[in-house]
Amino acid sequence: MEQILWTIFFSPLLSFLILILIFKPFFAKMDRLSSLVSIFAISLSTLLSILVLLDLSINQRVISFNPNEFLVIGSLNFGISFILDELTAVMLVVVTSVSLLVQIFSVGYMSQDKGYIRYFAILSLFTTAMLGLVLASNIIQLFVFWELVGLSSYLLIGFWHHKPAAVSAAKKAFIITRIGDFGLLLAILYLFVQKSIFIENSLNPIMIQDIIFAVNQGYLSDFFVTLFALGLFAGAIGKSAQFPLHTWLPDAMEGPTPVSALIHAATMVAAGVFLVGRFFPVFENSVIAMNTLAITGGVTAMLAALIALSMNDIKKVLAYSTISQLGYMMLALGMGALSASIFHLFTHAFFKALLFLGAGSISHSTGTFDMNKMGGLRKIMPWTYVTFIIGSLSLLGIFPFSGFWSKDEILSGAWSNSGIVSNIAFYLAFITVFITSFYMFRAIYMTFHGEFKGGISKKDLHESPSVMLIPLVILSIASIFIGFIINPIISIGFIPSHWFSDFIGHGGVKSHVNIFSNWFVYGATLISLLAILLAYQIYILKNLLLIKFIDKFTIFRKILINKYYFDYFYEEIIVKKVFLNSLAKGLNWFDTNIVDRVFGAIGWIGLNMGVLLRQIQNGQLQTYGSIVSLGIILIMIFFMFL
Amino acid sequence: MNLQDLYAISPQICMIVLGMLLILFDLFFAQKILLRPLVFIGLLGIFLLNVFLWVNIDSNKSIDAFSNSLVLDEFGLFFNCFFIGVVFFIIFISQDYIKSSKAKSEYYSLIIFSATGMMLLTSSMELISFYIALELTTLPIVALVAFNRDIKSSEAGVKFLILSGISSALLLYGMVILFGFTGSTLFDDIANIISQSSISNDKALLFSSILLISGFGFKISAAPFHMWAPDVYDGAPMPITSYLAIASKVAGIAILLRIIYSIFHVNINLIGSWSEILIVLSILSMFLGNLIAIRQTNIKRLIAYSSISHTGFILIGVISLLVIVSESGVSNSLDAASSVIFYILGYSLTNLALFTTVTIITNNINSSLIDDFSGISKISPVLAFTLTLVMISLIGLPPTVGFFSKAYIFNAAIKADLIWLVLLGLINTAISAYYYLRIVKILYLEEPSDNLSINFNYNQKLFVISTLVLIFIFGIFPRPLIDLSYIVVNILV
């Protein structure tokens, strides 16, 4: 088993190394072969990951091992150490399978690109980093791979580095997630502050299992647990683009679309959810942390969905939709419904990847993401159309698509809790269903229905090649069935009922309510259909009454188009006013007048010492000989006669 | 002389034979093109012979030869392999140089003879053979340094000849006193005699030690005996510069370890003085090397000063070894000794990459001024990236092998309670970052000149990339190298 896990992790790494060290310098012309190498490596990982998941579901044992010792300082041992539990197994399958499909799709999508090999190399690096992250069993390793994931995301967002927008989006993503990572780093450092408690109980403060054990045993104070959990959550907010650090994700859409599908929809942004899931017992021990999770998640879900209403760029719509769905997952975690959250992560990975790849397929044909320049594409691109509809219905949570099962798990998780926070969270989630349905069908109607309004001639439009359609079809099948298959309400064949919930929740899920007995299951479907109808009235039938009614709310529209002025607030107020004008000016004065002068003086001494010493090195053999003799004589006087 | 004696020095004999064969081959055959393959095959064969000997030797046992004047053990075998590897590398990067200088077989032979000297040096256990081996090491280098036959190169050759003559004289003088004092040239006998308490405090021993250390200081270019290094590094052909920087320095450190462990470790008082003298050398080397390097404009001189400062760092390891030996006995000094070997390995690996890239660059731009390196990242990203990683490794930052080299040296020093020396080392690391990173800045942030182009073949590219990968891999998984360095010094301790 250890070897299998090591292979899963190592094969994309090897592929990255082969691409960057062999193909890029030596065989730059053989780009097709390079993508084959990469796809082969990731297929191997995918296959093994599925095997691992199956094996774990049968044997149910947690494996942890340390393949490499990196540095030993006293009793602290830093090394690469892997853990395989249920959460890891699920994440392995999500990461590898979506990576595989995205790489296949990219063969078509990136076929004309100059940076083809670089692209596949970074994709492999990303997969490696992601696998290292989910397999990590110590928090240092987790942090290293967490940052490596961020790095590859940065490289891929800025992949077209000749586009200024891409470069600034990459920087923005990197810097804003770094703010969250600062919290994560503080949490880790705080662990070291408390290390004596760990060592007293012969635990290792960097091992995740030991941390969870210490928290469960009550070795650590409540204050510490809350602070630690909030630090972790800060990291999760940055990575999973939750309010108020969500602004980087829509901009990150400047990267290639398959990248958006893989990193900014399915895997990396889910890393925040994974992080909270990994330390879930820590969060459960702090009411404040749990409530923060729930409220942040609910507010994010709602506000992001509202922005999605006003976006005209199809990828931006999907980006805000992703933020909103991640909010759902956080909300579920805050409600204590870990399995529901991970279940939604799992189904969301597939249908959101499907939607993004669908958007990629559309732009491959139209050359734009602006929905105002689309329309009527359903006849030209039937495959893309049908798969996009499937993805959307799954996102909406329409029975029996996979999103239905996971979304209703979340809703029932929130409903079954009591208390004011849970009630707020539930209604936020419930109303968001309506908004989600509206913006998705608004996007579908603008893109696929009506007349084509694009700038390019209609003859140039085409359905994408089959190498791009196959991943779409596979993901559609997953989007339809996977929710029901892995977590059925009744036993089907060899799959026991509620398999997934029991698997993630270690069988400890309180009670499996039959979700069809709750009113909101029907309610949610009903409001979804209502929203679709409303969108149909406005965007297809152009119902004047409704359009006029909407126009009365221009102020809201303005707020939404400006994304609640978050970017304005960050860039104009915080960055320019607070940082540049006040803080930076003060520091600049300190830096130029005090720090620079001091170091300038030191540097001056250093430089001039160098000049002085260089005088001796005058090239004259006599000088050299004299210096040697002088040296020996001085040493002798010093050591023999003093 | 019996069969066992021949067995023990078979690698050295084979090297000599290979060197002579090359000269003969050149005399009788016209196909100069066959020379290189012949050298490579020959070296590979001798390397395999070494590996064979290593496999067949018991660890912790040594085979004595020629009535204890030479020895075959893992320490010597390791350095045999090391020097063969370095020769392999030198001949590899000499490709362009040989073409342009019309050098013939003597170029190869001289390098091989000098390396043979080093191989004998690390396995000699007797003063006379030690001295002969030392001269065998040095004299071919004199010829090689002057190989360009222009003014600069000849001047460097003469300087090297005279100054190494002085150092040989110092060493010889030290040895003579040692011999006069003990009446034997065998290391074992000398050790026996100087361990007797009645004479352990004698000033003559200290006098001879100072002379010996000065001689060694010359070989490893430690300040204040470093004066030859910048001029000779600058004047010599590039491949020979790298030979001096890598092989010559490593040989010096190796014999220093050998002498300490086979003679002087028995006399605690003497060891104390050794460590004090070496502390002076170490601090001087670090500060002189780094401070002068800041103002260098020529890459070869910069490398010279940088290598002087690295000598200072290696000496920190040797000093902590000596301190540990004098305070808690030889058996506890294993960590410190292995940290020295590990530093040597990391330093050599980094320098291999450094010299390969710098040789390629200087050959292409026909200049060894650092300012002419501007904007190379735009023309050859591979070279620029490798050079950057090399600089990071030379500074001693992760994730490179240089980081662990320094970390283990400092670790040894902390165990020997030499925290103040570690602090001085860290200050020097900071100083060195200035001139190393300035090169990176020139490579990346400045615009390339118009007609700059860099051509290098697949072999060179492969070599550059593999050194790059090794620096990186050992910067993450240093275990194999650390284990190796423990094996190497195990026999000494």
Image: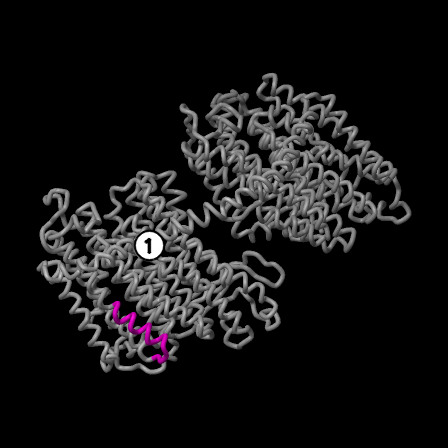
The image position of residue A153, as x and y in percent, is 37, 51
Q: How is the image coloured?
A: one colour
The answer to whether A283 appears left or right of B489 in the picture is left
Which is nearer the eye, A345 or A423?
Answer: A423
Q: What is the x, y in percent for residue A462?
A: 14, 48
For this rendering, which residue is in front, A492 or A291? A291
Q: Which residue is mark 1?
A: A565
Image quadrant holding the N terminus of chain B, namely top right
Q: Residue at x 13, y 60 (%)?
A: A538
Is residue B183 visible in the rendered structure shown here? no
The residue drawn where x is 15% and y is 55% is A446
Residue A349: x and y, percent? 29, 62
B89 up-or-down from A36: above or below = above
- Compared with A414, A114 (above or below) is above
* Magenta-colored span: A417-432
Q: How many marks?
A: 1
**For residue A603, which quarter of the picture?**
top right
Residue B71 position within the rendered picture, expressed as x and y whole percent measured from the top left: 70, 43
Q: Quadrant of residue A272?
A: bottom left
Chain of the residue displaying label 1: A
